[in-house]
Image: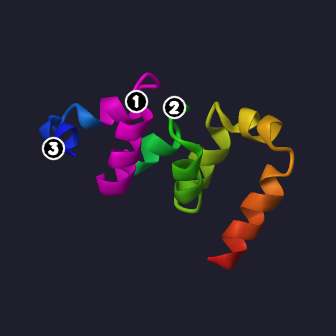
Amino acid sequence: MDKLAALSVEFTPTIAQDPSTEPFLLELIALYGDVELRQAVASNPNTPSKILFALADEFPGEFFNNPVFPLLTLENPDFLILFWNIQRRR
């Protein structure tokens, strides 16, 4: 948390978009960032899948266009069914 607080506000969007940003930092930005930052995290291929799923409702375009999306479906062919069921319960 100290690392996130220490980040300059002007650099945070760049960090949220950077595919080399550590997943734990992307998770913090998704949890505590504003709309623009959460949107950038949703399109970042290094974002943990649980965070991507959490952001999918808010940013479906970024979620489905995320470069990691095809890998999620390869990893679990039933991924879209599982995702749909999770979204229906909300």
Name which residue type carries label 3.
Ala
Observer able to see residue 64: yes
Query: Which residue does the image show at 77% across and 60% down from the upper left?
Result: 82
Q: In which quarter of the view is residue 65 placed?
A: top right
Q: How far apart in space, not on screen, are marks 1 and 2 (Cα)?
A: 7 Å
Judged left or right of residue 48, residue 89 is: right
How packed is label 2: few (under 14 Cα within 10 Å), some, or many (20 or more)?
Answer: many
Q: What kind of element bears circle 3?
A: helix
At which x and y percent is residue 61?
61, 48
Q: What kind of element bears circle 1?
A: loop
- The residue singled out by tag 2 in the image is 46
Q: Are marks 3 and 2 in contact (CB under 8 Å)?
A: no
Closer to the camera, 83 or 40?
A: 83
Name which residue type carries label 2.
Asn
- The residue singled out by tag 1 in the image is 22
Q: How far apart in space, not on screen, are marks 1 and 3 (Cα)?
A: 16 Å
Observer able to see residue 34: no
How packed is label 1: few (under 14 Cα within 10 Å), some, or many (20 or more)?
Answer: some
Judged left or right of residue 53, residue 20 is: left
Query: Which residue does the image show at 81% across and 35% down from the upper left?
Result: 74
**SS assignment for the magenta stretch, majority:** helix
Closer to the camera, 46 or 59?
A: 46
